Image (cartoon, rainbow, N blue to C red):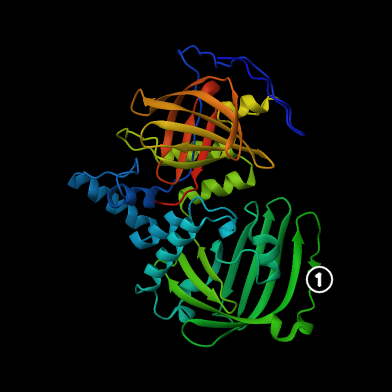
Amino acid sequence: MATIEVVNLPGLRFQAKASFLKRSSRSGSSNLIASVRRVSVPCALKNRIHAPRINPLKCSIVDQQDQERVTEEASVSGFSEEECALIDALIGIQGRGRAASPQQLQDVERAVQVLEGLNGVTDPTSSSLIEGRWQLMFTTRPGSASPIQRTFVGVDSFAVFQEIFLRTNDRRVSNIVKFSDAIGELKVEAIATIKDRKRILFQFDRAAFSFKFLPFKVPYPVPFRLLGDEAKGWLDTTYLSPSGNLRISKGNKGTTFVLQKETDQRQKLLSVISRGTEVREAIDEFISLNQSAEKRELELLAGEWQMIWSSQVETDSWIENAGNGLMGKQIVKPDGRLKFLVDIVLGFKFSMTGKFVKLDSNVYEVNMDDAAIVVGPYGLPVEMETKIAMELLYADDKIRISRGYNRILFVHVRVDGTN
């Protein structure tokens, strides 16, 4: 095949090569870690039984003893099967809904409607289960409504909470943005009134930043008293789980919120990745928690998988990084075909296709040999070849964790919805 010279694009560095072959390691081949997204001991265990066969952790044939073990472990988690379905739909959605695809939004809406039709806590505003701090996991309008929603909700690296205290003389509903343990948080507070068994009326009256490096609070510059009705609103609780771990609420501006007190193991891992600290330790703990006594076979599932984290530091060669799966998206086909796809700039993409074959219970051999710089219907061929041994450490239909060359870890999340 003829050598293709790749022209450097502004801001990008390419290496023109006649060919590129990732050399074998001592074990006979180089490894690449692939994809991520999904870990939750209880919910994942339930999915092994109830989910479709596409899920590597889901089994269509489970003996009675295994079913009893799964049921027992799931009951400890505090999440019902229907609640797990909602959590499952939330896995892989970034920006608490801001970056959700139409398919992902449809999956969440369907799961929300199922829970709202069930018998949760019938009188949530009078229940002690609604009290406390709730973490916001999803909202239908992350870029609108309140100032906090417009500014902070769509940023995954910040944790967003809502506190509800109704069983005191000073009833309060507060929205909190936690920037980090080292920096501090912003807390916006409202006076709360119970209207009926589901609705809370509120009026924002004060707000302040609490920075760890300052001995005093910094006022949030919003004149609530001058806002009038704009500072008022209401919040309906449409579902409160009997365990008190999950809540669905709807606001006066038409926004749907999904909040949790207890989070799924997968959600905890993704939060750590968003913060960017101690990720390797969190992955090791996650894998350990999800290992069973008997080693289960993991499958490289079909779908579009976005890489969200890698332990590999990218090299100066952009095209080498793309050709080795160190960035971008992986598109896995059921017939054994695989594509690496990386957005470059101004509609230009790097595309590389190949095939994968299963070698062992959790190991795949990946051969990529058809690369090109693509824009619209046109493509400029690039002569590259990459051979990878990919070991799956964890995989379900939402998250994949893999290990490869030089023990590089990859985490991918599925971004094409459930279909």
Is 326 left or right of 52, judged from the image as shown? right
Q: Residue at x 21, y 43 (%)?
A: 61
Q: Residue at x 51, y 26 (%)?
A: 32
Q: Where is 120 relative to 192, above or below?
A: above
Is 259 left or right of 156, judged from the image as shown? left
Q: How many residues crowd around disc 1 within 10 Å: few (fewer than 14), some, or many (20 or more)?
A: few
Is 235 left or right of 111, judged from the image as shown? right
Q: Where is 48 relative to 366, above or below?
A: below
Kindly tell me whether residue 78 is visible in this rendering: no
Q: Which quadrant of the rendered structure holds the N terminus?
A: top right
Disc 1 secondary structure class: loop
Q: Amino acid at mark 1?
A: Pro
Q: Residue at x 40, y 45 (%)?
A: 397
Q: Position of residue 390 (x, y in %)?
A: 45, 26
User: Between residues 118 and 140, which one lies in front from this camera angle?
Assistant: 140
Q: Position of residue 200 (x, y in %)?
A: 55, 82
> Which quadrant of the structure image shows residue 56?
top left
- The residue positioned farthest toward the left in the image shown: 64
* Residue on which the image places disc 1: 221
Q: Position of residue 159 (x, y in %)?
A: 62, 57
Q: Where is 303 relative to 316, above or below?
A: below
